[in-house]
Each structure stands twice: as structure tokens, then as C-alpha cells.
Image (spheres, helix red, strand yellow):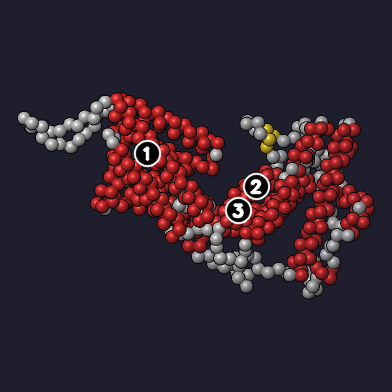
């Protein structure tokens, strides 16, 4: 077996000792033979390979077009792809339609001064959500707003009764410039403290109840916000009504504004750049697989970094008190694993909606669930590999090796005591083992290249 020279001790001799001890284990691992490495009679170090990526058949580098280059640089710098731009446009379209409709006289006369709620509700409906999630949320929003309208009518009935029981209904007729008998005029109502107090109590009760429910059930945050808006607007206008006829007309107009916002948002969600929950899950699965590959490559890079380093060296601690990875490779591996766990959480959130969605396709709900289960079975041991730095750190703390001392290139003769001798011996054993694994990996890669 070839050896890689190292400073501080003889790697070739240590590798030979390792081979003599584990000859049976190494012999069972397939390695490259001379015939496999020389399919065309060429030297083993000059295996043929195809042209690198981005080149033509003759090995010349393919010329990248200017738009493709700009797109590649933009994605690398910002991470914003075409789908993100589509979602940004989709989210801004619904409120734009609701506000632009005010250019119509009929629209302005219908919704008067509360038409602005159409645009607000169109935003809060989140039309950028996938189809299944949006429809489920929309059903909840409609039910909550209808319930809020019923409660608002009850509160306005209480305010009207408080006004009627605290004062006589005053009808003011006439206007400036009149004399003699009163001339006919529009009936108005004056300020009434009892009606205002009752409206304030109802507003307090509704906001307190919906805020408590929202804190207990965070998944109903959007419907709770819509209910709070309905309660605030209705209770502000409630003390001004002198009869239930006026209250009913206002509640009908207010509920119509909310439902109009829902209708605009639904049309945009279903017909403008439609997005299915199944498509979101399939994108999550593709990113999941790519993240798994990145984690495995980062793990290999971390293992290669241990071939000539002291894995028991103490970790640094930043100003926040968090442990900092001992090497750049370990930090990269940890970041990859964190990204993988984030994708796993997102997939679990999107999976129920994809299973409930009605769509044409080759994969059913059980198939999608089986895919997610298989990915989870691969993810668990992959995440477990990231605990190697913590294991080395725990061993160092237990054995008292967590001192500012690097023994990566030390020899047994340099050890002042038995404890450091054990540490140096452990480091050398890890170096030899990882070097052997690296050599076997290179041989197998050469075999695959030769066969290809």
C-alpha cells in the first residue's frame, strides 16, 4: 500500500503495522488491479477521462452566452430564482386589483369609506400559498369572518339598546336659515356615553378572547387577525347607530368588503401562476436529496482533514458562549446538517397538504409518504455523523486532554507522561486508519473511472 509522508513520525511504518494487524479486513475491500487500471495498456497514473463539465467533445471550453452568465451570477449572489419573482408578483397583484377598482364609480359608491379593507384582506389571505394550503386557510377565514359578523351584530344591538334606554330618541329637523315651524331634515343621533361604553366593553372582550386563542393556537394567526380587524372596525362605528336598520346595513357592507377581498385573492391564487402543494413537496424532495449529497461530501472532507490534525484539540468558544467548530471542515459539515434538518422540517409541514390535494399524477398519497419515510431513514444516520466533533471533545474533556496543546505531529518519544503518550498513540491510530480509508477511496474511484 502506498504511504503518504508526514512530519513527526514515519507514516509508512505505521501503515505497514496497521496492514499486518488488519490484513484480513483490508483484503476483503475491493481495490484496483493492474488490468483494471490499464484497460488500454496505458500507465496507471494516466487514466483516460472524458472532457470536464462545460467543455465540448474536443475538450474546448463551451462558450457561455451572456444571459446565461448573468443568470448564473445573479442566482449565486442573491439566490432569487424565477419562481421567487413569480411569487412576488402574485402577492402584489391581489391588493393592486382591490385598490385600483376604486377608479370605478360603482365600486366607490358600493364600498364607500371601508373599501380599503378589500386590499388589506387580499394581502392577509396569502394568495402565494400552495393550492391545498390556501383553500384550507380560505375556508377557515370565511367561517371566522362570518362568526365575527354575528358577534358584531350582537354587540351593535347592545349599543343601540343602551342608547334607547339612556335617552329619548332625538330627531333634529331643519337647518340654517329656517324660521317659524321646523322644516323637514335628515334625522341624526347625538353622542351617547352609554352606547360608547358598551361598545368599548365588547371590543375589549373580543380582542382579549381572540388574542388568547391565537396565542394558544398559532396556526390560526391569520384568521385571528382578520377577526380582530372586523371587531375593531365594527365597534368604532357601533355607537353612532340609532337603530338596528343602520347597524344591519353597515354589517352587511363590512362583511361584503371582507368577502370581496377573499374573492380577489382566490382568483389570483388559482389562476395567476398556480402552485400546487404536490409541486412544493417534489421541490422539497429534490432539495432534500441534494442536501444529503452535500452532507456526505462535507463529512468526507471532514474525515480527510483528520488525517493530519489533532482531533482532541479543544474547541474555541465565541463571545456568545457557543462552541465554535475546531476546523473549517467541521463548521461546513455542521452548517450542511443544519440546512438538512431545516429541509426536513419544511417537508414534514408541506407533506399533509400534498397528501390531501386532488391532482392528476402517478404518485398517490401513500407513495409520497413512503418517499418521505425513506428520506427520513437516510437523514437520521447522516445527522448522527455530525456528532463526531462532539464525541472527540467529550473524550478530551473526560481524559483531561482539553488543553491548548496540538499533538498532531508529535511522536511517542515527545510525550512527557503516560497520559499524553496515550493521546499521541490515539491520534496516530486515527491518522493511519483515515489514511488507509483515503487510499482505498482513491483506488475505487480510479476503478470506476477506468470502467466508465
Gap between marks 1 and 3, in whole Å?
A: 40 Å
Gap between marks 1 and 2, in whole Å?
A: 48 Å
Q: Position of residue 268 (x, y in %)?
A: 42, 56
Residue at horizontal 30 percent and vertical 29 percent from the top: 163
Q: Position of residue 227 (x, y in %)?
A: 43, 40
- The foreground one among 390 and 67 is 390
Residue at horizontal 51 percent and vertical 37 percent from the top: 214
- The foreground one among 413 and 299 is 299
Residue at horizontal 30 percent and vertical 47 percent from the top: 111
Q: Relative to residue 137, is residue 154 depicted above or below?
A: above
In the rendered view of the protein, which quadrant contains the N terminus? bottom right
Q: Is 59 left or right of 177, judged from the image as shown?
A: right
Could you classify mark 2 by the number of other residues whose Cα lies within 10 Å: few (under 14), some (14-19), or many (20 or more)? some
> Is tag 3's residue or tag 2's residue first in the polypeptide sequence?
2
Q: Position of residue 145 (x, y in %)?
A: 43, 44
Give the labeled residue for mark 2. 341
Q: Relative to residue 99, is residue 61 depicted above or below?
A: below
Give the labeled residue for mark 3. 351
How many callouts does the rendering have?
3
Amino acid at each position: 500500500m502506498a504511504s503518504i509522508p508526514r512530519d513527526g513520525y514515519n507514516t509508512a511504518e505505521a501503515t505497514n503495522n496497521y496492514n499486518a494487524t488488519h490484513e484480513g479486513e483490508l483484503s476483503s475491500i475491493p481495490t484496483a488491479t493492474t488490468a483494471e487500471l490499464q484497460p488500454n495498456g496505458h500507465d496507471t497514473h494516466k487514466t483516460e477521462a472524458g472532457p470536464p463539465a462545460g467543455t465540448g467533445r474536443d475538450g474546448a471550453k463551451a462558450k457561455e452566452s451572456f444571459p446565461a452568465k448573468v443568470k448564473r451570477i445573479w442566482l449565486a449572489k442573491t439566490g432569487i430564482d424565477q419562481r421567487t419573482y413569480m411569487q412576488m408578483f402574485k402577492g402584489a397583484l391581489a391588493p393592486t386589483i382591490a385598490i385600483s377598482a376604486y377608479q370605478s364609480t360603482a365600486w366607490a359608491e358600493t364600498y364607500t369609506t371601508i373599501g380599503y379593507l378589500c386590499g388589506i384582506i387580499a394581502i392577509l389571505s396569502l394568495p402565494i400559498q400552495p393550492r391545498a394550503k390556501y383553500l384550507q386557510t380560505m375556508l377557515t377565514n370565511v367561517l371566522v369572518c362570518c362568526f365575527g359578523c354575528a358577534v358584531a351584530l350582537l354587540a351593535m344591538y347592545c349599543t343601540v339598546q343602551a342608547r334607547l334606554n339612556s335617552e329619548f330618541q332625538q330627531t333634529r329637523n331643519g337647518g340654517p336659515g329656517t324660521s317659524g315651524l321646523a322644516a323637514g331634515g335628515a334625522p341624526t343621533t347625538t353622542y351617547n356615553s352609554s352606547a360608547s361604553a358598551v361598545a368599548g366593553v365588547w371590543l375589549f372582550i373580543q380582542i382579549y378572547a381572540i388574542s388568547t386563542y391565537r396565542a394558544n393556537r398559532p396556526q390560526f394567526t391569520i384568521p385571528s387577525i382578520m377577526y380582530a380587524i372586523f371587531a375593531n372596525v365594527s365597534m368604532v362605528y357601533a355607537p353612532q347607530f340609532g337603530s338596528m336598520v343602520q347597524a344591519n346595513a353597515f354589517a352587511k357592507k363590512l362583511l361584503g368588503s371582507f368577502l370581496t377581498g377573499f374573492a380577489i385573492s382566490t382568483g389570483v391564487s388559482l389562476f395567476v401562476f398556480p402552485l400546487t402543494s404536490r409541486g412544493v413537496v417534489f421541490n422539497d424532495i429534490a432539495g432534500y436529496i441534494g442536501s444529503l449529497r452535500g452532507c456526505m461530501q462535507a463529512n468526507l472532507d471532514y474525515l480527510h482533514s483528520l488525517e493530519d490534525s489533532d482531533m482532541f484539540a479543544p474547541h474555541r468558544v465565541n463571545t456568545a458562549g457557543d462552541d465554535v467548530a475546531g476546523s473549517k471542515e467541521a463548521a461546513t459539515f455542521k452548517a450542511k446538517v443544519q440546512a438538512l434538518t431545516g429541509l426536513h422540517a419544511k417537508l414534514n409541514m408541506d407533506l399533509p397538504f400534498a397528501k390531501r390535494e386532488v391532482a392528476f399524477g402517478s404518485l398517490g398519497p401513500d407513495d409520497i409518504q413512503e418517499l418521505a419515510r425513506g428520506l427520513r431513514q437516510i437523514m437520521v444516520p447522516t445527522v448522527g455523523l455530525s456528532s463526531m466533533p462532539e464525541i472527540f471533545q467529550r473524550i478530551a474533556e473526560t481524559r483531561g486532554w482539553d488543553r491548548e496543546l496540538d499533538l498532531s505531529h508529535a511522536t511517542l518519544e515527545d510525550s512527557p507522561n503516560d497520559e499524553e503518550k496515550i493521546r499521541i498513540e490515539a491520534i496516530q491510530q486515527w491518522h493511519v486508519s483515515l489514511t488507509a480509508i483515503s487510499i482505498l477511496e482513491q483506488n475505487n474511484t480510479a476503478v470506476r473511472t477506468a470502467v466508465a
